[in-house]
Image (spheres, rainbow, N blue to C red):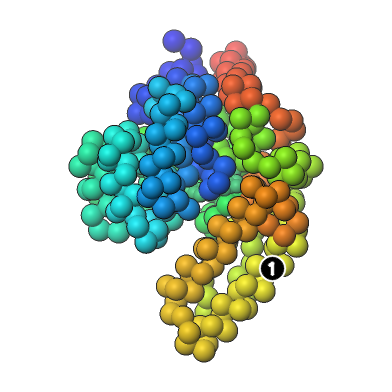
Amino acid sequence: MSKLDALMARGTAFLGSRVAIMAGAMSWISERHLVSAMSNAGGFGVIAGGAMPPDILSAEIAATKAMTDRPFGVNLITMHPQLFDLIAVCAQHQVSHVVLAGGLPPAGAIDAIKAFGAKVICFAPALALAKKLVRSGVDALVIEGNEAGGHIGPVTTSVLAQEILPEMADQVPVFVAGGIGRGEMMASFLEQGAAGIQIGTRLVCATECIAHPNFKKAFLRASARDAIASVQIDPRLPVIPVRALKNAGTEEFTRKQVEVAAMLDRGEVDMAAAQLEIEQFWAGALRRAVIDGDVENGSVMAGQSVGMVKSEESVQQILDTLMAEAASALAARQAA
Ligand SMILES: Cc1cc2nc3c(=O)[nH]c(=O)nc-3n(C[C@H](O)[C@H](O)[C@H](O)COP(=O)(O)O)c2cc1C
């Protein structure tokens, strides 16, 4: 067994894949084509169920199963009003892995997933929460740093990895995400105890990815510094920052926050409804860019690794490149 295979063994055993690389769920993007391509290429695809009602999720799982016989997961957002219905859909289809994103899962969610035999993977934004999640029975963790595309936490991947891997990696498999564009980085996190990695940005320009050609072009043109985090305008309205390519849509978000803050002031919405309004704004803006190709006014969510996305390639080529880079980094260290 190669050194790289040995380092990935725990992750591949947990996922049931050939390589310990998860395709992080990306709303509108992570549907049957990208997910099945990822799993068929030996990685682990994850359907983005966050913006889907139960019937659409059910159809997407069935369609993905028709395109791959390899394991894949389903990502659900904890604040989704129909979370338990979506879990029931996963149960009907006997989904093997459910990823819960967007905050601590509500009471009963983890048990409801484990009850039908699936493995539960949760995002851990801090060490204390990682410990709490493991105590609640989650089977694996994703730690995602601030460099990532989409909704982000405040802490970088390198710091989260140093805080969480030494304490948690021997308890449950931990997958590291955020800013990973090359295999050398994957090798480093595996050596630090990670079970595998999760990537998003690096996969957007895959040939199998259904994102609009304009969305892919924006990725190919961008460099790391173009992928900026959104700014919170009103201190009373806590919004989760989103990392995306700077465009007119970025300014539109500023206007949206002012509008929602005014609705809060007038008592037209409470805080939970205000936050949901913001999340719906993002889902709509992302759809506009990914599906309609309006990369000026929509949201082109992208991580800082966007500068390392240089051409449109198949998922297999992307995984092969990452694996070759990781293997040669490890070989160079062994030879030294
Ligand atoms: C366009 C885009 C959309 C995303 N949508 C979601 C989502 O719906 N749910 C989720 O849990 N993570 C989402 N993410 C985060 C990814 O799943 C993944 O963790 C992240 O992209 C990893 O960091 P990287 O972009 O630096 O590779 C999204 C990321 C991007 C780039």
Residue 245 x %, y %: 71, 53
- 179 or 76, nearer to the observer: 76
Q: What's the amino acid at mark 1? A: Glu
Would you say 199 lies left or right of 251 here?
A: left
Residue 308, placed above or below residue 40: below
Q: Quadrant of residue 324?
A: top right
Residue 155 x %, y %: 54, 54
* Residue located farthest toward the bottom when viewing the structure as drawn: 266
Residue 8, placed above or below residue 264: above
The quadrant in which the C terminus is found is top right
* Residue located farthest toward the left when viewing the structure as drawn: 115
Question: What residue is drawn where x is 52% and y is 89%?
Answer: 266
- 220 or 236, nearer to the observer: 220
Residue at numbered disc 1:
252
Residue 140 x %, y %: 35, 39
Mark yes or no: residue 253 visible: yes
Question: What residue is drawn where x is 23% and y is 48%?
Answer: 112
The quadrant in which the N terminus is found is top left
Would you say 240 lies left or right of 53 here?
A: right
